[in-house]
Image: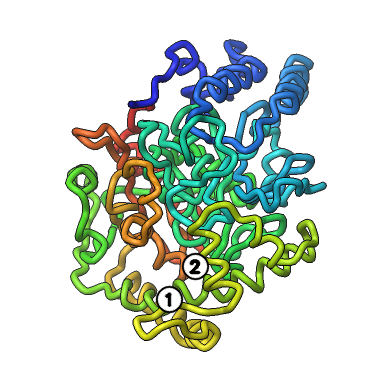
Amino acid sequence: MKTSHVAADALSTDLTIYQAIEAFRDGTLTSTALVEACLRRIEELKHLNVFVTVDAAGALKAAARADMERAAGKPGKPLAGIPIVVKDNIHAAGLPCTAGSPALADFVPEKDAPTLQKLRDAGAVVLGKTNMNEFAFGATGYNPSFNTGSKVGVRNAYDSERIAGGSSSGSAAAIGARMSLAALGTDTGGSMRIPCALNGCASLRPSSGRYQSLGTIPISTSRDTVGPMAQCMSDVALLDALITDDYALPPIALAELRLGVPAEFWVRLDEETQACAEAALNKLREHGVTLIDIPDAGLFDLNQPIGFPVVIHEARVGMQAWLREQGPGISIEAMVEKINSPDVKAIYEQWVLPGKLPTPQGMIDVEPLYEVAEKTGRNALKQRYQTLYESLSIDALVFPTTTIVAPPAGPEVNEPETFERLIRNTEPAASAGLACIQLPVGLGRRSGLPVGLELDAPAGSDRRLLAIGVAIESVLGRIPPA
């Protein structure tokens, strides 16, 4: 059965950040009214299992303060009174930070992560902490913990019988279902881009090192990053500017834009994904964008020896450091005992703790594979990306973010085949530390489910890539809300 939304609140929460700020200025909307509408929507759609913690009292207090300051004529902060949500592996002062796991149910950080602090300083109102794959291991959001509805796992904003994707599941579903105007998520191999593609919202995976990692529960310290998520690319660009103090958005002429189309990212797509993505490319071509076919990018083969060895090796070392230096001080073994998701528990017990990886020949030590990935593999992948950008004079690569629309929710969704179809296109750029954006480009003709398009650009080109995203969105338009 599809999710039913309440029309009255859809009118008041289906707003971009810029639209809400304009309504605040016009006096046609208060932050308190907007936050109240978001809280009603959260309650009405609690069967989607989006939240671990809702801070209604804190959000209403912050909203009232924003309204009072506005009424008093005080200089407005950029996000004054704008409701946002935060993935539950990012520290928020005074709120539990569980990483979607009962193992951390009692951990309450004293300080915001620096990324969140920047948004709070800009006036953002935190509605609460969103559910996710346990410890961010997974791409589905099918987590049996902290469910507020009768069914298992975070559910899709457009169809509650479908998954939300992951691991930033609740953050994307909250935006897609118009419970919030924006969110913070994290991305290790696709964890912001995948759920945004499946829930019809936009996101930036920043270049590696662009955002601070302090106050974030880790998986892979060399690949993890916090990032912004919102309804449109302009809002994502605003959030990125406030976090980084980098406000420049260079002008983009579509007639001068050159995008590479890597063939290997466009195979084995489901019918609806292929139709929507190809229609988007045709429209861009009609508006003067040059599309360069790349029959032999070779990025999947170069990424294959990097992904799992890096993540599994760094998962133990990084988590031990976080537990000791920022977390509750428990051992990683004690943490693993309380993991609730069978698939995640197996990963920790069979791979992470013993430092092993499965191969056709049996379990082998991950450390030698990690050393090869770090010494040669990652550099070879980065060099291949650089060669493609330079030799073809392209601004970015473009392809469908996921190969499928959101599949039905159920235990089988955590099987490796579904994981591979969700993460296949997003992972290589994460290994290379590139700047990546995801934007919605259409709804499947039969399913009505969102389809997303990803663009990957050279590391350090985040602001230009965001400007490209804004320009593309102006041509393709925005998809209807759920």
Does 264 sit above or below residue 7?
Answer: below
Residue 95 numbered mark, or none: none
Q: Is residue 226 visible?
A: no
Q: Quadrant of the C terminus?
A: top left
Asked if residue 387 shows in the view, the reply is yes
Left or right relative to 152: residue 270:
left
> Which residue is nearer to you in this view: 275 or 304?
304
In what element is the residue under mark 2? Answer: loop
Which residue is under mark 1? Answer: 382
Badge 1: how crowded within 10 Å, few (<14), some, or many (20+)? Answer: many
Which residue is pictured at 27% across the width and 32% down the height? 448
Q: Secondary structure at mark 1?
A: helix
Whether residues under marks 2 and 1 lie with C-beta atoms below 8 angstroms apart, the answer is yes
Q: Amino acid at mark 2?
A: Gly
Which amino acid does the dot numbered 1 rest on? Answer: Lys
Tell me where residue 209 appears, x and y as whole percent. 60, 65
Which residue is disc 2 drawn over? 433
Of the 4 image quadrants, the one containing the N terminus is top left
Residue at 56% in and 25% down: 42
